[in-house]
Image: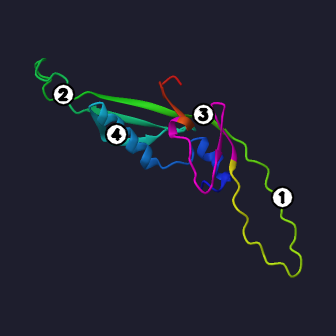
Amino acid sequence: MILDPAQWDRFLEGEEYTESSACQQAADFAARNGATLAGGTCDRLAGGDEGFIVTVRTTGTVGRSLIPGTESQHATASARAVLEPKCNFFPPEPPESPAPEEPGEEPTGEPEPEPITGLTCDEEAWTIDPDDPKLPSAADLFAVRLIGDDE
């Protein structure tokens, strides 16, 4: 995908990513905060928003025997998060075709890939070397925003 900038727009809009990886990140975040995904649920949002709804359950109990009757109760909560793109990609003009080879000249083969330009994230321009790609992190590419039922 890195060498095919034509695919970048869908990715930067949050439409081309590995769903299982996004859900694993949600599970890791829940674990760091003393919870698990309730029933393993991590579902894509419906209705055109790119994001997920996740329900979590605390690993500890609510009362921890401080409040009678809550020793075995766990808290649950649901959250909806949308991915908001922080980047734009304007593909550069395609390179000009090389001049036709003269009779008797050796073929030159495939041209070297040019650096990829046109990616801007929060007003920072990125130039990507196809031979040694160093890409922006997910935090550079997207903001994650929790949304309520009224959005």
Dot 2 or dot 4, earlier in sequence: 4
Dot 1 or dot 4, earlier in sequence: 4
The residue singled out by tag 1 in the image is 96
Whole-percent x, y for residue 139 in the image: 51, 35
Residue neighbourhood size for the residue with mark 4, other residues' Cα within 10 Å, grouped as few (<14), some (14–19), many (≥20): some
Residue neighbourhood size for the residue with mark 2, other residues' Cα within 10 Å, grouped as few (<14), some (14–19), many (≥20): some
Tell me the quarter of the picture where residue 54 sits: top left
The residue singled out by tag 4 in the image is 28
The residue at 87%/66% (across/down) is 99
Q: How many angstroms separate mark 1 from mark 3 (CA)?
A: 31 Å
Residue type highlighted by circle 3: Lys
* Secondary structure found at label 3: loop
Dot 1 or dot 3, earlier in sequence: 3
Whole-percent x, y for residue 50 in the image: 54, 38
Query: Seen in the image, is 35 located left or right of residue 7?
Result: left
Residue type highlighted by circle 1: Glu
- Whether 128 is among the magenta residues is yes
Q: How many angstroms separate mark 3 from mark 4 (CA)?
A: 23 Å
> Label for residue 61?
2
